[in-house]
Amino acid sequence: MSTSMMSAVIAQKNQKNNNIKKGLAILLGLLSVLAFFLPYMQFVFKNTTYVVSGFQLATIKGFRVIGPELSGLVTIPLLTRISVTLGILLAIAGIVLLLCGKPALAGIAYILSGITPMIVLISTSSIQEAVTQLNISRISIDYLWPSIYVLVGGIICSVLSLWTQGTEKLAESIFLVFSCVSVGSVILITVYIFAAGAPAIIQIGLGQFLFGTQWNAEANLFGILPLILSSIAGTIGAILIGVPIGILTAVFLAETAKPQVARLVHPAVELLAGIPSVIYGFFGMLVIVPTIRDFPPFKDNTIGDSLLAAIIILAIMVLPTIVSVTETSLKAVPQAYREASLALGATQTTTIFKVSIPAARSGILAGAILGVGRAIGETMAVIMVAGNVANMPSLLGTVRLLTTGIAMEMSYASGLHREALFAIGLVLFVFIMIVNISFTYISKRGVQMDAE
Amino acid sequence: MPSSSLYGKKRRTTDTVLKVLINGAAAITVVTLLGIICYILFNGLPYISWRFISTSYSETNDELKGILPMIINTMYIVVITLLISAPIGISSAIYLTQYAKQGKLVRAIRFTTEVLSGIPSIIFGLFGYTVFCILFRLQTSILAGCLTMSICILPTIIRTTEESLLSVPGAYKEGAMALGAGKLRVVMGIVLPCAMPGVLTAVILAMGRIVGESAALLFTSGLSYNMPKGFWSQIFASGRTLTLHLYQTAREAASPDAMHIAYATAAVLLILVFLLNRLAGLLSRMLRKG
């Protein structure tokens, strides 16, 4: 009797709590509807200030701006209008859904309404560009409290309306939203890298851009064939040196070394992975480059900064990746394979090279591909040793790779030149994606093969 | 395990050669590492002094060649990035290991995490520059750098946390559930505390990554070496980290004095990374012992 009474009391209390949350969510939602009619943004041109409410942003055409040389109508971007309107509609939808007893959907509507100020923020950049074209350089676009409230209020309302379903549901939704961040960022990165890189490629012409052999920003010549070839040459060189050493080191760690020795070497490999790339570059600049410059056979035809220096540095940098992936896959080879081979009279080295390594080959291949990805993408170490002149690759000559091409000129480039640098980024991104996807494919196939 | 065949009589030359190659490769790896570390420390340590760490930097004034602003900027970036990225990464790992059912969404999350870890930092730099600096109008600022870095380190945090969450014995969870605890209480009260050393390892690994990062910060947080003027305003100001300082001073060094600064900065960086690395190793050993 008493337990059922107690549970009734608890249920009543929960109901009361839920009503408070629901009421708060509706109230705050109404506030964010109200916020659209309050001053939303403030545009300060040279000597005039416009304070615009969300409602006005959605309805008026634009501002008449009088510049020093030109004057004209600066239109408000369509996306801005749409997202401001969507913000208010979604907030209303949230309130209605909550009243209809659909808290999950209401939560989604609220959070989407909270995102709209971000889209407004992004889309109003084009106002800035339009004004700059009218020769007005001094403009500031400020956000007033109501627009920030829409953002914060949207999130709070969303949390409150999900909370009415209980803490468990709320926690799960929050974890879910956070774990979608990585999906969202990959999509955003892909979209923006393409959006920033494609215009220059279209303007220059894909063939001209990829296969042009001249890179000269002053003469408007943007051919990146030397950069692509140098990147490929550097990567292949690094892999040719790094993979054998890496695999053998992994064999040492996983198969032949005494446990005490392995316990010392293993952290060394980890530390090698942790050293910042700038330090590798610094070391290369001060040790490897002078060594190449003063090495008797090379002495007359190199200044030291060269493809060879880049290859050596990259080989050192891909080592830890290859070692750790190979070691993991060697350790995954069943001990019975080795025992069987030894029982047949094979020596330890024969066992390693005829049994263990073939059994782990998909893992080793995956490690090599991961190393390729590292080598193509490395920037700061290479920039300090490669000389950075856009020559066709030769072992002892100065070279510029895709990555260093971007980093070298980004700080002062403008116009088509800058867009061309973004286009290099796009080419690099495509390379990396191909490498990445083949890595995922191969490591997945390896798992399947092991399962069979 | 016998390394020669029966009775130790026959020794094959190929065996010996391959053995030498294996040991040689391991020796090359270790010697390279030791070479780099010794070279940097040997040349850098003599120039590290309290004065070097505690004064500000100026390109023109010879009296002011310290790295205090860079240390402060690096700390800003580490702390803010972790504040953004650690909750997101740990929540993702919790979702992936404790809540998610196998399906399209989970596959998408895993795939994108893998893709993110393969994207080179210069691409993150370009992305951060177009999105955070230009579209969000943050200019080159510490905050833009932090936002860029938080995407950069997300895979590190997710993966390491995931591993440590998976290593918590299922019996603990079942025990708690049998006592009537809800899922959230099981996760927050049992699984997460048990996996804490692993989570901390993830955070420290991420710290090491942030301290060592340079290409992603080159365009986003900029190269200004001014002393911070205010606690909050510094977040919106441009500032170079230790790595970028090393890069810039090494490239511009014209005199031996300037090279000393680069050496000393490199040594400071190396010591920092080494300490973080050791700390992470220590914690993961703690986790393994339970």
Image (cartoon, rainbow, N blue to C red):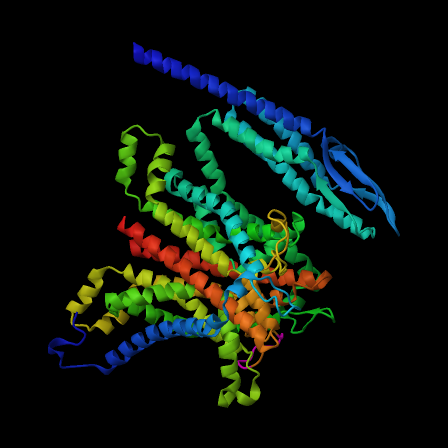
Q: Is residue B218 left or right of residue B157?
A: right
- Residue A139 lies, in percent from the top left, at 77, 47
- Within the image, what quadrant is residue B277 found in? bottom left
Q: Is residue A106 magenta?
A: no
Residue shown at the point (63%, 24%) measured from the top left: A30
In the picture, measured across the screen, residue A118 lies left or right of residue A287, that is: right
| Quarter of the rendering occupied by the N terminus of chain A | top left
Front residue of A435 and B251: B251
Q: Nearer the viewer, residue B176 or A82?
A: B176
Which residue is depicted at the point 61% across and 46% down?
B232
Please provide percent x and percent y for residue A103. Answer: 51, 25
Q: Is residue A100 above or below residue B223?
A: above
- Name the residue furthest top: A1
Q: Is residue A324 above or below residue A395?
A: above
Over which residues does the magenta segment extend? Answer: A389-396
Residue visible at 49% across and 90% down?
A296
Can you see residue A274? Answer: no
Q: Is residue A9 above or below residue B46?
A: above
